[in-house]
Image (spheres, helix red, strand yellow):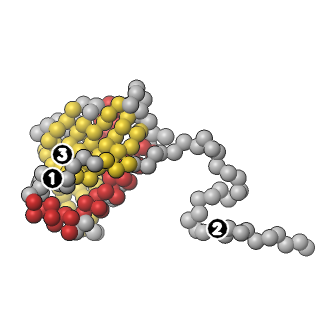
Amino acid sequence: MSQSAPDPTPRQTDDARPESGAPLPAAAKQAAWPQRVDVGERQVAYTVTVDAPADELWALLANPHRHHEIDGSGTVKQRVTGPHRLTAGDRFRVAMRKYGLPYTMALTCTASDEGRLVEWAHPGGHRWRWEFEPVDATRTQVTEIFDYSWARPVVGTVFERLRLDRENAHGIQASLTRLAARHL
């Protein structure tokens, strides 16, 4: 009985290589990685190109009842009260969960331009903004911004000391990756 030589690169439980050992197709489509964008002090922003028209992406993010589908932080839940299409001045409430604690956020839409941007403010003053810039008819440059420059200076300092700016950066990257992956 012959014995086969041991695999020189043993598999790990999280190894993504195909079991057959066959290479993945070189042309396999995948989402691009979000890239950091410098938009100013006390703002965290990342951008990615998504294979979908700007109007379609805006419609998804301008509907707070669908935010949980994209949220990469794991904090946004399904229960929402308020409009299904945000316009400036609209108020809505979103069920959230962070550090195992459930709570509800009362938010106000501060800007909405169909196919271009949607933004809402938290009671603490910080804002979340999504911008949609058409690349062509079927692709859009999407930028998500956590903007705490609107918050009182002491609130911004607390965000930084608790590293919430960094935590939100990870959530933004995950949200943009989820959004792009929906349109592969």
Q: Considering only vertical position in the picture, is 57 above or below 65?
A: above
Q: Where is residue 27 in the image (x, y as percent from the top left)?
A: 60, 41
Q: What residue type is labelled 1?
A: Ser
Q: Which amino acid does label 2 sit on?
A: Arg
- Whole-Å distance between the Cαs marked 3 and 1? 14 Å
Q: Mark 3 points at which residue?
A: 120
Foreground pick, 118 / 161: 161
Q: Which type of secondary structure does the marked residue at label 1 adopt? A: loop
Q: Mark 1 points at which residue?
A: 149
Q: Is residue 181 left or right of residue 173?
A: right
Where is residue 119, by image quadrant?
top left
Q: What residue type is labelled 3?
A: Trp
Residue 151 visible in the snapshot: yes
Q: What residue occupies the far right of the structure in this picture?
A: 1
Mark nearer the N terminus (3 vs 1)? 3
Contact, mark 3 vs mark 1 (Cβ under 8 Å): no
Mark nearer the N terminus (1 vs 2)? 2
Front: mark 3 or 1 = 1
Q: Where is residue 86 in the image (x, y as percent from the top left)?
A: 20, 38
Q: Where is residue 43 in the image (x, y as percent from the top left)?
A: 22, 52
Q: Is residue 12 left or right of residue 138?
A: right
Q: Considering only vertical position in the picture, is 164 above or below 172?
A: below
- Whole-Å distance between the Cαs marked 1 and 2? 46 Å
Mark nearer the N terminus (2 vs 3)? 2
- Whole-Å distance between the Cαs marked 2 and 3? 45 Å
Q: Residue at x 42, y 29 (%)?
A: 138
Within-10-Å neighbours for mark 1: few <14, some 14–19, many 20+: some
